[in-house]
Amino acid sequence: MAKKLTALYLDAIQPPEKGQKDHWDDEVTGLGLRVSFGGKKAWTLMYRHNGLLRRMSIGAYPTIGLSEARRLARHLLLEAATGHDPARRKQDERHADSFEDFTKVYVEKHAKPLKRTWREDQRMITAELLPRWRNLKPADISRRDVIRLLDAIVDRGSPVQANRVRALISKIYNFGIRRGLVEANPAYMVENPGVERPRDRVLSEDEIRVLWKAAEDEGRLIFDTLRLGLLTAQRRGEIIGMTWDEVDLKRGWWTIAGERSKNRLSHRVPLGPQAIKILRDRRNLDDDSRYVFPTRFHGAGDAPTTEIQKVIYRLRKDSKIEFVYHDLRRTAASYMTAIGISRLVVSKILNHVERGITAVYDRHSYDSDKREALDRWDQRLREVISEKSTPESDNVVPMRSGSESSA
């Protein structure tokens, strides 16, 4: 008999004297909590597929709480109502028994449908997780394995990256728990190894010159990625994920689609002379990828590069200059304000979040101002690289936004 389930009621349920007992929910038909003689509590779901009554396990309680269990049950019942068999689908997914297969399920079923930044998840999986855990079973990865991985990332000088990796591992395993693919999260109770502080780092002219030359030694693809970061002041993910259909080399425009921009609005970036030359040179390469900066890993398919973080680590080590990719964006913005470009125009170039009803309607009204600004910055950067100093170079201060999240 179904009854109104509450958290207090579920916590108070005592194990049966033998076997197991189901406690059915009167809010979501077919959802119940099965309590075994040994005290184990797990969510179960009854549904019909092709006229036959089917049962499947959703996950353990209290790992999956009441509200989450109801949400998952409704989703599974909808799946069954549209002719699919969620129990069979779950069975098929269980065959993905390597960690690599496990992450593929996460990317396809969770990251791609729900996250605009799924490519960053894929990049970290490829660069950080698979080299260590590719052929392991997900359930065999322990908390100690997670800590060893994070320690190694910190030891190479990337504590903030270690924080990002820890968060991703936790997301992947929480997804797996909800889908019934794993029972525990090895990142649970593992603390972030890095202390994060707001950055206001702006590279000096000498540092720009050193990194420009050092980046060139790393190879054309990564060099071009870093140069465009300085020339356009756009975000790392937007540059790495650039596709040829976004670029109009004839008119000198790069249009970032709303699903790829941070504020979900399409963003037009004028391309200065050096940026156009970089892209034309890349277009002339014998490469049929739709990405401007494709991966060089065989078997990865047509995907953007995942090497940028490793290269930045090497550049920091070789040049003795402490920087992250976002510092290129901040540096470009700060130098633009130093040569007299208004903060409003710089904010338009950075595609910061805009407020108010007019924000949507004047997206392109600053196109000519943005083009003039980036052309001036292109020329100023040429002077920096060629060591032609100007009075403004002594007055470069960090370009700050109203909100750190909009940067």
Image (cartoon, helix red, strand yellow):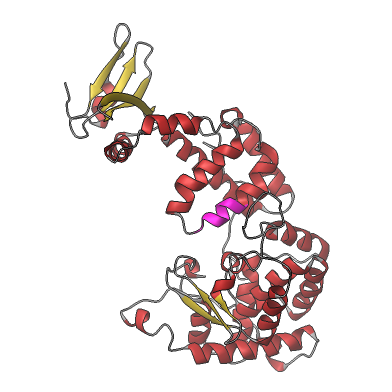
Q: Is residue 12 magenta?
A: no
Q: Is residue 120 magenta?
A: yes
- The quadrant in which the N terminus is found is top left
Quarter where residue 325 is shown: bottom right
Q: Is residue 387 above or below residue 285?
A: below
Magenta residue span: 117-123
Residue at image location 73% in from the left, 48% down from the top: 155
Instruction: Judge whether residue 156 can be spotted in this image.
Output: yes
Q: Is residue 146 left or right of residue 112?
A: right
Q: Position of residue 386 (x, y in %)?
A: 80, 86
Residue 397 makes an appearance in the image: no
Please tell me which residue lies in front, 300 or 322. 300
The answer to whether residue 187 is above or below residue 369 is above
Residue 333 higher or lower than 294, as above or below: below
Q: Quadrant of residue 328?
A: bottom right
Q: Residue furthest top?
A: 18
Q: Depth check: 270 or 294 in front? A: 294
Instruction: From the viewer's side, name the closer residue of 94 and 401.
Output: 94
